[in-house]
Amino acid sequence: MLNACDICGTSRYKEGDGKIASKQMRYFPLKPRLQKLFMSSHTSSLMRWHAKGRVDDGKFRHPTNSFAWKDFDKKKIAFASDCCNVRLGLATDGFSPSTMMNVSHSTWPVILIPYNLPPWACMKKGNFLLSILFDGPKGPGNMINVYLQLLIEELKELWEDGVESYDVSKNEMFILKVALTWTISDLPGYSILSGWGTKIDKGCPCCGMQMMCRRLEIAHKYSYTYHHRFLNSSHRFRRDPGSYDGKTKDNLNARHELAKLGVRKLLHEFKRPSGMVIAI
């Protein structure tokens, strides 16, 4: 067992007496649990539902109907040709296990979802695959890539080489391969997973470097403006650009920002002769 990181040399234990781990996580291997899905008579046939059982009538009932799924099939024909190959989604977020909200503790699970299953099965709690659990008291933050190394190595192995598995419904052995198709998270979680900063001037991962924003000097935050440019050219909001120019939450600082920007004059504060400040 290593006592220090073989890359940077940092000790795995806290300074002081005893061997107390600096950080800890719990990792649950993925291969045996995927193999069990095909070894169970209840789920083995359902793992081929995405190719054999679904109805393709143009309605969106399952991720198999999405453009991302179909585009992946076109690019990875060899993988898509075997319906036993598994497609996973990765979801993660932090939560406090305590019911007391004033307790500062963040536990982060990393959950894998097998999308081969039909919609009435893939979203059941029993079919979620808990892969990693960060015990806390603090979340992994921007160092999550360090904790994901074991999972990434296993996913790469399953993508390139696969693992020999048994399909009980067909009574035969096959090579099981896996693809991680997408991740599921809120915007702060997306920032941690992808490394794309969502609290800066280019905070939208879709707009990227074309993101337009304005720094609010009074509120000390970024206001992401000009999104009305994505509307149809005939939309009435396209002819009212001044109304979408940096308005923050409706408070006194927001009124100051509007006055500083020179827009929405009806919302500016004004003073009565008595000196009282009025905000309409």
Image: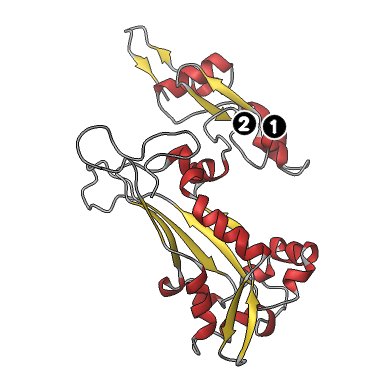
Using the image, determine if residue 73 lies above or below residue 167: above
Residue found at x 71% / y 32%: 210
Q: Position of residue 36 (x, y in %)?
A: 49, 79
Q: Is residue 43 visible?
A: no
- Alpha carbon separation for disc pair 2 and 1: 6 Å
Residue position marked by numbered label 1 in the rendering: 209
- Horizontal placement of 71 versus 60: left or right? right
**What's the residue at 46%, 67% (across, down)?**
129
Q: Secondary structure at mark 1?
A: helix
Disc 2 crowd, CA 10 A, few/some/many (<14, 14-19, 20+): some
Disc marking residue 202? 2
Instruction: Return the x and y of residue 183 as percentages of the image width and height.
Output: 56, 55
Q: Is residue 191 visible?
A: yes
Q: Amino acid at mark 1?
A: Met
Q: Is residue 188 above or below residue 277?
A: below
Q: Which quarter of the figure has residue 233? A: top right
- Which quadrant of the view contains residue 20? top left
Asked if marks 2 and 1 touch (Cβ < 8 Å), the reply is: yes
Closer to the camera in the image, 243 or 30: 30
Instruction: Pinpoint residue 50: horizontal percent, then vertical percent.
Output: 65, 77
Q: Residue at x 56, y 39 (%)?
A: 195
| In this picture, residue 114 sits left or right of residue 251 | right
**Residue 226 — which label?**
none
Callout 2: helix, strand or loop?
loop
80 or 157, which is in the foreground?
Answer: 157
Circle 2: residue type: Lys
Q: How many other residues sit within 10 Å of disc 1, few (<14), some (14-19) or many (≥20)? A: few
Q: Earlier in the sequence, mark 2 or mark 1?
A: 2
